[in-house]
Image (cartoon, grey):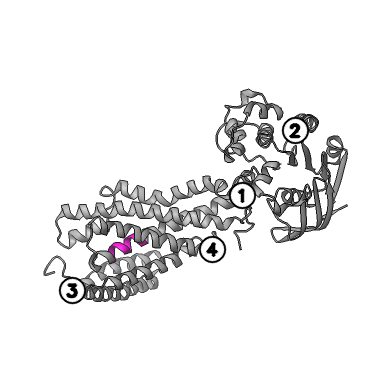
Amino acid sequence: MLFDLRDVTASRGGHVILRAVNLDLEEGATVVVGPSGSGKSTLLRLLNRLGDPDAGEVRFRGRPLADHDVLRLRREVALVPQLPALVEGTVADNVELGARLAGQSTDVDRALALAGLDPSFAPRLADGLSVGEQQRVMLARALALEPSVLLLDEPTSALDERTRAAVEATLVRLAAELEISLVVVTHDPAQARRLARRTITVDGGRVA
Amino acid sequence: MTGPIDVSLWEVAAALVLVAVAVGASVWQGAALESDIGVAVLRAFVQLTAVGYGIDLLFDQDSVALVLGLVAVMVLLGAFTARHRARAVPGAFWPILVALALAASATLGLMIALGVFEPKPRYLVPVAGIVIGNAMTAAAVALNRLGDEVTRSRREIEATLALGATAAQAARPLLRRSLRSGLIPLVDQTKTTGLITFPGIMVGMLLGGADPVDAVRLQLVILYTLLGAVSLSALIAMSLAYRNFFTPAHQLREVGGE
């Protein structure tokens, strides 16, 4: 089992977002679908411990999250946030960031290629990129950590239809080519069907 | 005035003519500041007179222990004041207190060790006042900026944490910007000193009849000391305070902490 959540209650900004959630997420690709404010993003944040539940327990591959080294966990379970948040500098600076923080080196070109970007992007300045390109750099940055799980929060919400289709194709290819599990959060049921066989619906803080 | 440093009460009272100008301006423009000006004038008189007698007593006693006690009180009051200005930073009091105490003791200790000042109340009290005052402002400005930066950059901080960064690594760009904010006022002031403003110690010494070259040299010593003190103060306050924005599990706390 990739993740299992037992009686998880979680809040953000003083509001209870998830209520007594029980959930099993298997290895492979899973899409969590639900309307805005339903608790999808909060659920994703729990999986790599950007947040902790108020009550209940989250386990990763059978061990409680609190028993994992949190920094190693976040490199193993990499999260790509909904909105791009790149640091100042070049695309390469950004792609290398996670590995550099851990004192390791990384193959920038490979990470860019995996995210569907040409190596010629490496020396470009991050703040000159389109939103779609930034989103892909965020993806490359996460892939550079060589994670075994990728958490994606609304990976195409800021993109036009053509770019969205390209990103979706990249994700499907990643799941097939790399031995990587995906947990994708989306508000779009059609996208959920395109991306994965397994779909979990969250609504009003509960798993439907 | 009989001598350069002998000021009679009559002369102080004469300076009130210029307070009348301020009151006149307020009345003329309807600024309604007359009573505030009155309170300010009275408070300045009472507070400074009390401080004057206090310092007189301190100089007479010539006790280093008494000076250290006074410095401790200044550090404490400075930390309370700066904490109010850095309200966006959770638990800011202790970081500021430690920062002021270390900045004051390190800089004053070094000045004494280098033989710049004798360890006497006459030198220690005013210099400690200037050092702590500036260190307090720098710490408050730096922490205030840090609070703003954390609020504004939540997305960037969490995105960096999500890559396995420690809280220290995620906060580093913010600390860099906040330190700049804390130091720039004094750096700018030091650059323009003597061109735009005449610093207080120099003015005081010149009015007191000191040799201008001595006055300038002492002012330089103070300015250089202050640069060290404010850097230390801002750096220590930020290095201790940023942790309060994060949990031990390298998570960004929600609304500025506990």
Give the numbered dot on residue A160. Answer: 2
Give the numbered dot on residue B8. Answer: 3
Quick check: A41 above or below A162?
A: below
**CA distance separating discs 3 and 2:** 80 Å
Residue A133, percent from left and from top: 67, 31
Q: Amino acid at mark 4?
A: Gly
Residue nearest the observer in this picture, A102 or A190: A102
Instruction: Tell me the element at label 2.
Output: loop
Q: Which residue is mark 4?
A: B91
Foreground disc of the pair 1, 2: 1
Foreground disc of the pair 3, 4: 4
Instruction: Tell me the element at label 3.
Output: loop
**Mark 1 surroundings: few (<14), some (14-19) or many (≥20) residues within 10 A:** some
Quick check: B43 above or below A157?
A: below
- The answer to whether tags 3 and 2 share a subunit is no
**CA distance separating discs 1 and 3:** 58 Å
Instruction: Tell me the element at label 4.
Output: loop
Q: Which residue is mark 1?
A: B154
Foreground disc of the pair 3, 2: 2
**CA distance separating discs 1 and 2:** 26 Å
Residue nearest the observer in this picture, A103 or B52: A103
Q: Earlier in the sequence, mark 1 or mark 3?
A: 3
Q: Earlier in the sequence, mark 3 or mark 4?
A: 3
- The answer to whether tags 1 and 2 share a subunit is no
Foreground disc of the pair 2, 4: 4
**Mark 2 surroundings: few (<14), some (14-19) or many (≥20) residues within 10 A:** few
Residue B239, percent from left and from top: 49, 54
